[in-house]
Amino acid sequence: MALARGEGCRFLIADAVGLGKTIEAGLMIAETLQRRPDARALVISPAGLREQWRDELRNRFNLDAEILDASRLARATHLPAYVNPWAVQSLVIASIDYVKRPEVMRSLEALTWDVVVFDEAHHLTGRSDRAAAAALLGDRARALVLLTATPHSGDDHAFARLCSLGNADGSEPLVTFRRTRADAGLRVSRRAPLLRVRPTDAEAAMHEAVLAYARLVWRQSTGAALSGARLVASVLTRRACSSAGSLARSVERRLALLADASTPPSVQRGLPFAETAGDDEEPHGLLGPPGLHDEADERRRLEHLLQLARTATSRESKIAVLERLISRIDEPAIVFTEYRDTLQRLANTFSHVDAVQLHGGLTLQERAEAVRRFTRGTARLLLATDTGSEGLNLHQRCRLVINLELPWTPLRLEQRAGRVDRIGQERRAHAVHLVAAGTCEEATLARLATRMRRMRGAMSLLTRFPDEARVAESILGQHPRPDLLDESPQNPGGIVTPDIRRDAHEEAQRIGQARAFSVDGSGSLAAERPVITRVRQRRGRATPRCLWVYKVVFTTDAGRLVWEALLSVSGDAAGVRGCSASLMRALLNPDAAPLESVVAGTSDRLLEQLQQSMRSALERWSGRECDLMAALRTRHGRLSAGLLQRGLFDRRDERLAAAQASLLDEALSQSAGRLRDLAQSSDLRIDACELVFAVLLE
């Protein structure tokens, strides 16, 4: 409704996990495509969710979407060389990692879209190729829709970058919606127990050693080495919480990197640690920079830590508890862990159980097959890294999620549980967290998880949760932060949160009434001519009344439909009782002069109200169209300068520049046409006013 009424051109849908953000965005796409036959929409999602998007759009909205990637474009041999395949389809789905390629962006930058949807938009907040591609596409969208259940991960600057997408001139508001389960009328039925697991003596010694080493690195890291060294401390501590084998592998790799003096230092990522959040492999390049001032002391500590980790690998308490838990339940379960090597350890442990793996090393086809086996019931266990924590609908088969360790990004707990705790889950969902007692997991992360569980039902609009950098500072720094969830987010300006629930309720009632009038359920009146009837009321009514209902159609001067409304008029019919059929028809005559006068006056007032209500929306849409045209011209100027490098015999650059100029001219021409349509929409007319039905109430 906010989109159709022109309350904004940029939308952030931040509903909690499992509340149907895909359906809400699909409705916005379907409405746009139905209102404008020449409209075009683009959905950008993680690669693993493209097929799911296509299925949802087809099954729920009867929309055929085309997935475009390198292989599909290579097979598009039926298109002429001068035709841009992105401009052919009205509804396209692509992954962000594909569209960010320079050659792909070159094909997209001269196009405009009526709707651009970014799924899992929190991945676009960094300073990366993904964010740059999203910014370019956002500037070319008449309506930009951002979907994420976790808009604010704790980094105010990252959230500000998210809120600025598609806001070229800085004046366009961001219309924001966030609903919790309570807002959606759903009872909170999830249980999320913390199971304290007592470590073995070897594991306790390992945790004590790794935490001492990590805190020492944290204190000694200064200057240019701060980022890399602290990241090493964070990685080793996290992998110790995952499994002893995972830690042992990383320590081995770190010792090898420190010993190889000829290896140049890797370029390190800076804090915060969100850039590595989705990596389920061993972070090879991140383990190279020195952490302590005394290199010999650091090697001794690492060698001792490696020995402790190898000893603890022989018997891991969490995996033993997990085995007992799985053996005692008789239903499917999902087990999450952060790292792929820990996942392989679990796969070996549960080799006797029908289990499938889901991790970042699988191809898209292998991931789809793993999910298919689990959802169809041929596999009892789904062993997954956070590759499987976004977007998947697993609630029809499963209600149990087990977290082998607590992630340092607390919102991942919500993402993981959201795979089974979704709309349509008919049973109570369970999210079980295994916590190593006496370690940093229990000291800090378990408290965060508990507080998140308490806040789940009453989250504010954009509740700020701590990111990995703040969690790491709390665990490894000198000043622990028990108040990580107490800070309020510093939201940037320009965020609008409309409350249109009452209007939405009235619209739902109107749709229900329209469907009740139709025979086939489509909402269209079945009769081609007015229906005139008489209804006898209860005895004692003094004066009969006539009721006329008209359909008024408002269009632009060019004939484009803008709005349809039902107009009702009633009046007394004194002396009608016992009248003849001819007299009754005369009373119900829609062409009677008094009736025509009333209908015409009421229609004119509706027209005036409609034009007034549309004024601000037309101004916003016109301004957005002008911004699109400016972005097209500016970007094209920078691109052409690099493309056109004349050669003596090679004229490919000239042809490429000419093709880009042709696309630009076409896009600008379309935008100019849209501006003309918007200008015409400010001057509406009554195209038709037809009687739908009339009733004589006796």
Image (cartoon, rainbow, N blue to C red):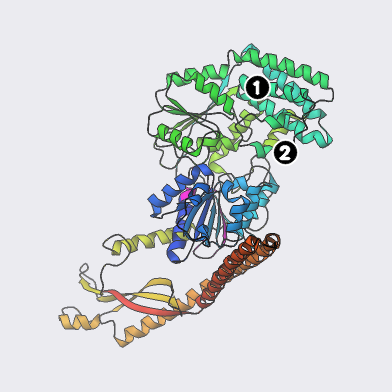
Which disc, if any, is residue 176? Answer: none
- Counting from the top left corner in percent of width and height, residue 508 is at 40, 59
Give the farthest residue toward the bottom.
593
| Residue at x 56%, y 72% (from the top left corner) | 669
Tell me how far mark 2 sits from mark 1, CA to CA. Answer: 21 Å
- Callout 2: SS: loop
Q: Earlier in the sequence, mark 2 or mark 1?
A: 1
Find residue 333 and report its image quarter. Answer: top left
The relative height of residue 114 versus residue 266 in the rendered view (above or below) is below
Q: Pointer 2: what residue?
A: 269
Q: Is residue 68 magenta?
A: no
Q: Position of residue 662 (x, y in %)?
A: 58, 68
Looking at the rendering, the stretch of residues picked out in magenta corresponds to 1-22
Main secondary-structure element of the magenta-colored stretch: loop
Q: Nearer the viewer, residue 224 or 27?
A: 224
Q: Residues within 10 Å of mark 1 (few under 14, many from 20)?
A: some
443 up-or-down from 111: above or below: above
Residue 283 visible in the shown view: yes
Q: Residue at x 20, y 80 (%)?
A: 584
Quarter that holds the C terminus: bottom left
| Residue at the spot 42% in from the left edge and 76% down from the top edge | 554
Residue 7 lies within the magenta run: yes
Q: Residue at x 53, y 65 (%)?
A: 6
Q: Residue 365 versus residue 526: which sits nearer the camera?
A: 365
Please determine whether, in this image, residue 535 is positioned above or below residue 470: below
- Residue 185 x/y as whole percent: 45, 46
The amino acid sitting under disc 1 is Arg
Q: Secondary structure at mark 1?
A: helix
Amino acid, disc 2: Arg
Q: Which residue is mark 1?
A: 249
Report which quarter residue 581 is drawn in.
bottom left
